[in-house]
Amino acid sequence: MKQIYVDHAATSPTHPDVITAMVKVMQSLPGNPSSVHHFGREARYALDTARHTLAQSIGAKDSELLMTSGGTESDNLALMGTALARQHEGKHIITTAIEHAAVLKTAKELERQGFELTYLPVSREGQVALSDIRDALRPDTILVSIMYGNNEVGTVQPIKKIGALLANHSATFHTDAVQAYGLEAMNVDDLQVDLLSTSAHKLNGPRGVGFLYVRAQTKLHELMYGGDQERKRRGGTENLPAIVGFAEAVKIAEETRAQKQQDYEGFKQIMIGALDVAGVDYEINGSWENSLSHILNIHFKHVSVEAFLVNLDMAGIAVSSGSACMAGSIEPSHVLVAMYGPETPALKASLRFSFGINLTKTAIEAVAAETVRIYKRLAK
Ligand SMILES: Cc1ncc(COP(=O)(O)O)c(C=O)c1O
């Protein structure tokens, strides 16, 4: 049976050129970038070159990137690091109800430690309202953390407008751009963000590496104590093969961005077209206009998501319920609860299709046909 992977928002296959770049580092650069000898200098050069590529991709200075172990660490550092550094100025933090667990669980921990959190609501399409942010802001607000694009439903937030709104407030502005980075062009000055999280494995780079962009002069307390790496802000010998692989992935993402966006929008049309023709009773979760191009989350009415997922898996199609699946039971999505309320039937019947490299029009047509076939069987 041919397997079709339609879960690229969970993690994406590592690009062959990324693997080649990483193997080359492992084979030819044995030194530690902190060492002063020849081997160290060669490793340092590779690290600096990769950092430059990554910094350029968001219009940042090389010195403003802090390499991390991925999205989770970047988000933890953004929230915890800001809270620790600015707690004497205020204890109020604003975020949204639809953030990834890496932000939400850190926010909960900060609440436990005495910080006051405001979780902004979202519309039925998953967007925060600028007026809600304006109303929530207080003189003692030290941080606003709002994700760029949602990982479950794909809704993109008006980050540039939020940046402009916050320009006259002293709060640090963080965005979790983990799902959007690579696929969406972004510039930190244009967005007016102070902190921005990314992760390589969402854009065909290796797992376990990412960065936190930290605007110069932004107050941030370190969380990892050790050596003087990352300008003394994150100790630990740099994961050079992964960082070089990440930079390679970013180069490829920039070269292929326009084509990918066009392809994935086309894939969405194929999916929706097939459902419409077959008379499937469905609704799109999220926004059609303001959405990441690779994520399509659909509420299939009158079916159970567990049965749907299992049947798709048996047909060789890997998709996601859009939320963590633990010990065989599917946790209700906090994102859908925030969009529709706790009683919505969408909670038990929504699937996330997410697109990426290696997928063709023909493969998506097969996915659409199989989805329709299974829906018809289950909805009886
Ligand atoms: C929006 C968002 N933030 C953070 C993360 C965590 O990233 P990582 O898996 O690199 O720790 C993810 C990964 O699913 C994500 O989608």
Image (spheres, rainbow, N blue to C red):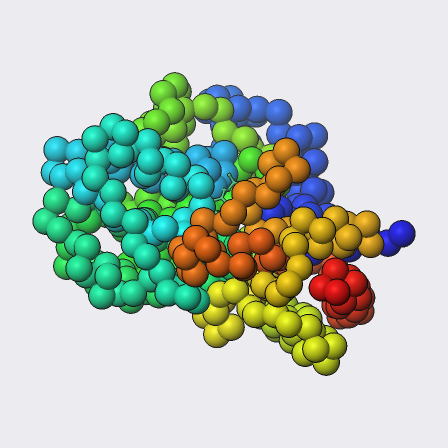
Residue 235 seen = yes
Q: Residue at x 74, y 48 (%)?
A: 310
Q: x%, y% of residue 286? A: 49, 65
Task: State left or right for residue 71 relative to residue 12.
Answer: left
Q: Residue furthest right?
A: 1
Q: Residue at x 13, y 51 (%)?
A: 138
Q: x%, y% of residue 96? A: 34, 52
Is the residue 219 above or below the residue 121 in the image?
above
Task: State left or right for residue 268 relative to residue 98.
Answer: right
Q: Residue furthest top?
A: 226
Q: Residue at x 41, y 66 (%)?
A: 124
Q: Residue at x 53, y 38 (%)?
A: 209
Is the residue 252 above or below the residue 260 in the image?
above
Q: x%, y% of residue 260? A: 62, 66
Task: State left or right for residue 330 relative to residue 15.
Answer: left
Q: Quadrant of residue 245?
A: top right
